[in-house]
Every structure is written in C-alpha cells, then in structure tokens.
Image (cartoon, rainbow, N blue to C red):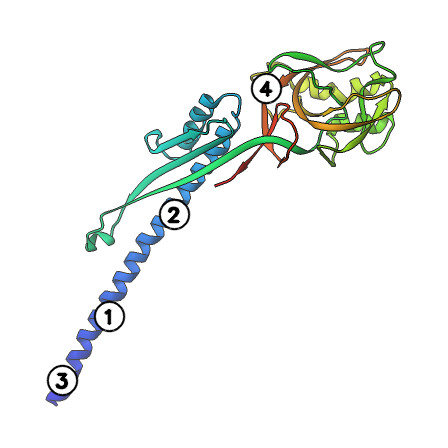
Amino acid sequence: MRRHRAESGQATVLFALAAVALLSVASLSLDAGRAYIKTQELKSAADAAALAGGQELPADPSSAKSVAIATAERNGVPSADVQVQVNAQDTVVTVTTRGGIPYYFASLFGIDQGTFQETSAVQVGPISRVTGAMPLGVIWNDFVYGQSYVLKDGGGEGSDGNYGGLALGGTGASTYQQNLEAGYPQPLTVGQTLETETGNIEGPTQQGLAARVASGAGYSWDTVPLSSPAVVDLPIISPPSQGQSQVTILGFAAFFVTGVDSSGDVTGVFLDAVTSGQFGSGGSYGLQAERLIE
C-alpha cells in the first residue's frame, strides 16, 4: 500500500508539471498570435503608405513622403513610427513602419515587450500596357503638366484626312463613339501598330465625350480625381501619313478632358498620373505604372 501511495503521488506531481508546461505553451502561443497580427497590421500600413506615396512620383518626392506618412497614420501607425525614403532617381519610395505590443505571458520569462517593423517599397516607371484607352492618338510635343492642349483637331484643322482619331477594334463612327464613351476594352501596348480613323466625325466625338466632360465640371486639373471619367489615357503615337494610315504607339499619357466643341475639337490638360499597369522600356510621357517591389 505504501508503494501504491508513492506512485500515486508521483503521478500527481507529473500531471501538475505537465499541466504547467501545457499552460505555458498555450500562453506563449497567444502572445505569438498577437505578435503575428501586429506584424500583419504594420505590413498592411506600409503597403498602403508606399502605394499612396508612389502616386506622387517622380514629380514631387516631398509630397510622396508626406502622403505616405499621412496614409500610415490613417492605418493606425503614428508618424513617429514611420520612416519614408525616396531614392535619388525619384522612382522608388520605401516605407518602414514600427510598433510593439506588451507580452502578457512571455513576461513570466522576462520578455515584457515585443517590437516589430515592416518595410514596403513601390517603384514607378513608364507604363507599357494600358486597357481602357481613348481612341485618340496624340503626337508628343514636350507637354507641360497643368497646361491645356488640343487632343483632337476639329473641322478644317486636320492633316491629310487625319484629325486625331484611332480605329480601335474596327473602323466606323459607332465603334469610335463607343470607345470614347467606355474606353477601348482591349489592352494597347507600346510598339503596337494601329490604324487611324480618318475624317472629323464631330457628332460621335461630341456624343462620346459629353458625359466625360460633364463629370469633370467643377474640378481643376490639380483637384480632379484620377478615377474620374474625365481623366483619360491616350496613346502617344508616331505621326500619321496621308489618309488612313498606320501609326505606332510610343507610350501613354493622361489628360483631363475639359471640352469638346461643335467642330469636333477636343481639349484637355496634361497630367502627371500614376496607375497600376505593366512596366516596359518605352519612353516616359507622364503616365506612370507602379508596383510593389518589397
């Protein structure tokens, strides 16, 4: 009987030790789970901040930094815990977010605080592929941000039958108007060859752009949201020859469409804009693509 009691007592001690060990592991797992959630929050904030800052590059690196910090703050990271750097070429913004949590159970082992940091980086560069472009081809002329330009010539202003229209997905006024209203649904790529849409076609031009121009009413070029239908992506093209001819896409530019008159003349303001898209080796014409690289 004495031996039985001794074995029973040993089992109780072993059970107690095992229970303590299991409780410790479970408690530490809770701290580890909270640490994981914190790092995910910091990473999400860094991603959002870097993407927002990238929208300001390469034109305004100072604004890229301030926008990134403000975005991180809106995502729960105080400005004191945010570090933003822009590279010398103004093409990459890097955001580091820091934060910590108190440990509830790890403190039993002398670990009172967990401190973490996450880093995200966004690169911007010339965009080489655009979906939803307008059927208007623009010849590059050293445009200046914020200045207004003619995007399509009106009656009597064309050259050799070309007024700036492009035949995207087929020729004809109805296809042209539909592409003005909704954007060409297929991707266009730098280096691609396109056909011009000859003639002034002022009626479809007015009807196709009416809603877009109206949506930009009350905005200026520096306040219009890039998501507005009045902000359009246009191919920068090689000069056309006489009559219906082939042109080559050299790059893409963004414009704020401000007017279309009865003659079919279309005007717009040249924008510095960043969007999601495919990078390429084409020239830089104001419209940039951005991507997370870290």
- Circle 2: residue type: Ile
In the image, 1 versus 66, the foreground residue is 66
Question: Based on the displayed image, in which of its 4 quarters is residue 259 positioned?
Answer: top right
Horizontal arrangement in the rendering, residue 27 relative to residue 224 (left or right):
left
Which residue is located at x 47 percent, y 41 percent? Answer: 294
Near mark 4 (Cα within 10 A), the count class, few <14, some 14-19 or many ≥20, is some
Q: Where residue 212 appears, x then y in whole percent?
A: 70, 21
Q: Which residue is drawn at 13% across and 84% down?
A: 5
Mark closest to the chain's N terminus, 3 or 1: 3
Q: Mark 1 points at which residue?
A: 18
Residue located beneath label 4 in the image: 224
Q: Which mark sits nearer the N-terminus, 2 or 1?
A: 1
Q: Which amino acid does label 4 sit on?
A: Val
How far apart marks 3 and 2 lie (CA) works out to: 48 Å
Spatial separation of the CA atoms under disc 3 and disc 4: 84 Å
Say whether disc 2 or disc 4 marks the residue closer to the N-terminus.
2
Calculate the distance from the C-alpha at mark 2 to the C-alpha at mark 1: 29 Å
Where disc 4 sits, the SS reads loop
Splitting the image into 4 quarters, where does residue 266 fall?
Answer: top right
> What residue is rendered at 36% in x and 53% in y?
33
Mark number, residue 271: none
State the mark number for residue 5.
3
